[in-house]
Image (cartoon, rainbow, N blue to C red):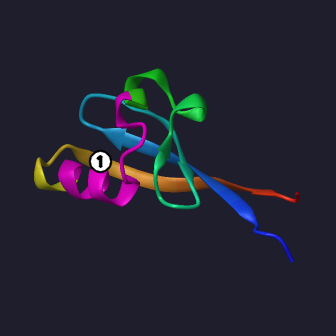
């Protein structure tokens, strides 16, 4: 069996912006399928970014809206 590649899409709503954020199987933000307002997070750990937003009291909500699995 080969490695199964997964990518999750989250809807992230903060005090300033809202939009989709793509997260790869390692938990890192993937630039190309992420809303332009959140592309600065590319390569950073999504869970760490959520903790940062919570600490600053900027996070309104984060919800998983899709999970893609590459069959190859």
Give the left or right position of residue 7, taking residue 51 as reference: right
| Picture coordinates of residue 46, whole percent (x, y) | 39, 53
Would you identify the image quadrant in which residue 3 lies? Answer: bottom right
Quadrant occupied by the N terminus: bottom right
**Where residue 70 sits in the image (x, y, percent)?**
81, 55
- Answer above or below: position of 10 versus 37: below
Q: Residue at x 58, y 60 (%)?
A: 25
- Number of residues whose C-alpha sits closer than 10 Å to that of mark 1, classed few (under 14), some (14–19) or many (20 or more): some
Give the answer, above or below, for where 3 lies relative to 43: below
51 or 5: nearer the viewer: 5
Place residue 22 in its image quadrant. top right
In reply to whether residue 60 is colored magenta, the answer given is no
Report the residue that reaches farthest toward the left: 56
- Secondary structure beneath dot 1 equals strand
The number of callouts visible is 1
Q: Which residues are magenta?
A: 40-53
Query: Looking at the rendering, in which quadrant would you find the C terminus?
Result: bottom right
Q: Residue furthest bottom?
A: 1
Measured from the top left, where is residue 61 in percent x and y?
36, 51
Nearest to the observer: residue 26 or residue 68 = 26
Q: Is residue 1 left or right of residue 25?
A: right
Residue tagged by mark 1? 60
- Percent position (x, y) of residue 57? 14, 49
């Amino acid at each position: 069996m080969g490695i199964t590649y997964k990518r999750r899409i989250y809807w992230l709503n903060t005090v300033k912006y809202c939009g989709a954020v793509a997260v790869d199987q390692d938990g890192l933000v993937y630039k190309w399928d992420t809303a332009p307002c959140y592309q600065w997070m590319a390569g950073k750990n999504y869970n760490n970014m959520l903790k940062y937003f919570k600490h600053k009291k900027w996070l309104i909500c984060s919800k998983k809206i899709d999970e893609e699995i590459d069959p190859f």
